[in-house]
Image: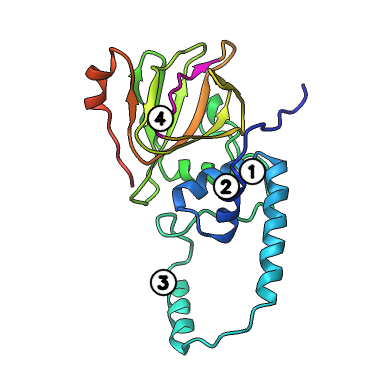
Amino acid sequence: MSRHYPEYHPESDMLLEYSAGNLPWAQSLAVSAHLQLCPHCRQQHQQLNRVGGSLLEQCTPQSVDSSVLQRLMGRIDSSEEPDINAEAPEQKTASTAPERRIGNDPALAELPQVIHKIVKRNLPLKWRRISPALKATRLKTGQDKYEVAFHRICRGGRTAEHDHRGEEIIVVLHGSFSDADGVYKQGDFLVRRPGEVHRPIATEDQECLCLSVVEAPVNVTGMLGWLVNPFLSFRPG
């Protein structure tokens, strides 16, 4: 079987913000997961890093207060390992091999390393049934603007058609799904913005697992919306 390479990628501006370290933590997590699954974007990221390094070399050195180094060393001494609640996702992509399986769940068998680390800190995962076709589990990441979660659609499952009250980033981690705009497979990176309506449908051969980073709850459209929307939760952190 030939290997699938992602066809949907972060926009150039987002990748540039990620390389510069200016992207919000939760969005950086999604970009980092995509990079570990996408050789095309990894190459772009490496090129951007080289350009950034070249620009830094041309900058005039600036003096800083001696207390800056003392504070930095104090932070290093206070923690033997990085705190995922305080540090941004690691942006180096030297190793792209998938981590080992978590439990017996086939959907979690080939997670990008950055996601694998998040999952291990959230075990046991607590799945919540949203509809007959859709389950979700929130992942605690320690940031206060975006909700980070797994959404999984059963084989051939159809989710409710919905709009977005805020931006949503989706990274496909297992299986595939489609909507009116296309078919999305492992590694594909999508951004949905307010006003964009879609209805994800998983393929018939296997369930689909996605990482979702959202800044507001979705808005279910149609007659079902008035009943469901008041109960849709949104919990950053």
Q: Where is residue 5 in the image (x, y as percent from the top left)?
A: 71, 32
Q: Where is residue 141 in the image (x, y as percent from the top left)?
A: 40, 48
Q: What residue type is labelled 3?
A: Ser
Residue 156 is a magenta residue: no
Q: Which amino acid does label 2 sit on?
A: Ser
Q: Where is residue 29 in the image (x, y as percent from the top left)?
A: 51, 47
Against 109, residue 91 (above or below) is below
Distance from Cα at disc 1 to Cα at disc 3: 30 Å
Cβ atoms at labels 1 and 2 below 8 Å apart: yes
Cβ atoms at labels 2 and 4 below 8 Å apart: no
Give me the residue at 51% from left, 13% from top: 155
Distance from Cα at disc 1 to Cα at disc 4: 30 Å
Distance from Cα at disc 2 to Cα at disc 3: 26 Å
Give residue 195's mark: 4
Q: In this view, does 137 lie to the left or right of 154?
A: left
Question: Which type of secondary structure does the marked residue at label 4 adopt?
Answer: loop
Give me the residue at 69% from left, 76% from top: 57
Q: Is residue 1 left or right of residue 208?
A: right
Q: What stretch is highlighted in magenta?
A: 194-202
Q: Which amino acid does label 4 sit on?
A: Gly
Write down the residue under mark 1: 36
Give residue 184's mark: none
Question: Which comes sooner in the sequence, label 1 or label 4?
Answer: 1
Question: Which comes sooner in the sequence, label 4 or label 3?
Answer: 3
Write down the residue under mark 3: 78
Write down the residue under mark 2: 32
Cβ atoms at labels 1 and 3 below 8 Å apart: no
Residue 197 is a magenta residue: yes
Estimate how packed mark 1 is, as few (under 14), some (14 to 19) or many (20 or more) residues with alpha carbons within 10 Å: many
Question: Which type of secondary structure does the marked residue at label 2 adopt?
Answer: helix
